[in-house]
Amino acid sequence: MNYLVTGGSGFIGSHLVEQLLKNGHSVINIDNFDDFYNYKIKVQNTLESLASKSEFNFTDKESDIQKLSTETKSNYYQLYHQDIRDKEGLEEIFKNHKIDLVIHLAALAGVRPSIERPLEYEAVNVRGTQNLWELCKDFGIIKFVCASSSSVYGNNEKIPFAETDNVDNPISPYAATKKCGEIIGHVYHSLYYIDMIQLRFFTVYGPRQRPDLAIHKFTRLISENQEIPFYGNGSTARDYTFIDDIIDGILKSVTYLQTNENVYEIINLGESEVITLSEMLTTLENTIGKKANRKMLPMQPGDVHKTNADITKARTLIGYAPSTNFQNGIKKFVEWFLGNPQ
C-alpha cells in the first residue's frame, strides 16, 4: 500500500511512518517543518523513523531539509517540504504518486497558542485540511484517516467522554478548528463518498514528544533544576495515552477503512485512565529521582479541567486495546529523554 502521511516528521507522525515502513508499505511524508518548535527536532524524528545514520550539521533550515529530502528518497519513502495551505503545491504531489489512503496528522497544535493566533489556526487546520479533501475528490482517493482531538469536548461535565456527547461548546480556537474538521469531513463523505475515520486523540505522550508539552517540559526543567510552571491547584486531570497505543489505534483504523465501505466514524483513542497534574508530576519526580521546584500559577484560559476517554467504541469497532499504563509509559519516556536531552 502507498500511504500519504501529513505531519510525518512530527511526534505522532514519525512513529506512524516508522511502523508503516516496518510493515512493508510505502510512505509519502508531507511536512512543512513549521517554526512552532525547532526544526532540528523534526529532522531527528525523520531520521529515527527511517533508522537513518545520516549526519546533519544544522547550519541552515532550508538546506538541511532539502538535504534530508534528497538523502532519504527511495522507492518506499519520499519526504516533501510542503505546507498544506498551498493547494497547488499539494496537487503536484498528488499528480506524482498513486495514493491508496491519506492519514492526516498535520496541524497547528496547542490550545494556548491558538488563542494568540486564531486566524492562522483556522487557515492551517480548517482550510489546509479542506485542500486535502478537495484533492482526494479530484484524484479519486476515497480512504482518509484524520486526527481530531479530545479538546473538542471542552469542559464536558459527563465523564467519561463518549463520541455521542455534545461537542458544540469548544473553549479554544484549536478545539473549534478540530470540530470544524469533523463537520466538513462529513460533507466530503456524504457528497463524494470518501470513507473517513476521525480520531479524537487524548493527550499523547512518549519518546519524541513535542518539547512544549507538559511531560516533556517538566522532565527537562526537573533535570535542569529549574522552576516548574504549575497551573492551578493540581486537580486538573488528563487521559494520558502512550504513543504506541495511539499508533496501534491508527493502524487498526486504517485496516477497518480498507475492509469496509460507506464509513464515517468518530472514535476516541485514549487510555481510559485519568491522571491529575499532581499525580503526573509526582510520577515524574519518582522516575527521574529529583524533586520539582514548583512555581504556582493560576489556571490559563482555554485549558479544560479534565479529559477522560470512553473507549468502548474503539474496542468494539476496531479492536483497540491500549496496553501501556502511565507509570510504565513515563519510565519509557524518561529513558528516551535521558538519552536524547532536548
Image: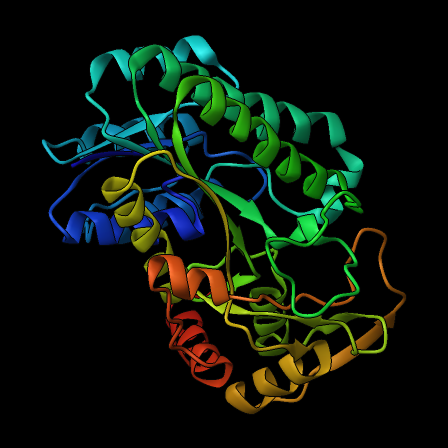
Q: Position of residue 82 (x, y in %)?
A: 41, 23
Left or right, 178 with respect to 64, comes to: right
Q: Residue at x 75, y 53 (%)?
A: 154
Q: Position of residue 257 (x, y in %)?
A: 31, 42
Q: Residue at x 56, y 69 (%)?
A: 240
User: In this view, which residue lies farthest toward the front?
Assistant: 262
The number of numbered badges drawn on the structure is 0
Residue 118 shows up from this direction: yes
Instruction: Looking at the picture, tell me which residue is in the foreground, 252 or 279.
Output: 252
Instruction: Looking at the picture, tell me which residue is in the foreground, 42 or 279.
Output: 279
Left or right, 50 with respect to 307, comes to: left
Q: How did the renderer colour the structure? A: rainbow
Residue 104 shows up from this direction: no
**Which quadrant of the rendered structure holds the N terminus?**
top left
Find residue 72 and report its image quarter: top left
Q: Position of residue 172 (x, y in %)?
A: 77, 44
Q: Residue at x 58, y 21 (%)?
A: 127
Instruction: Looking at the picture, tell me which residue is in the foreground, 1 or 186.
Output: 186
Indicate whether 282 appears above or below 24: below
Find residue 117 and report its image quarter: top right
Indicate whether 3 appears above or below 92: below
Left or right, 200 with respect to 70, comes to: right
User: In this view, which residue lies farthest toward the right?
Assistant: 298
Left or right, 151 with respect to 50, comes to: right
Find residue 194 and report its image quarter: top left
Q: Residue at x 84, y 57 (%)?
A: 300
Q: Position of residue 191 (x, y in %)?
A: 47, 18
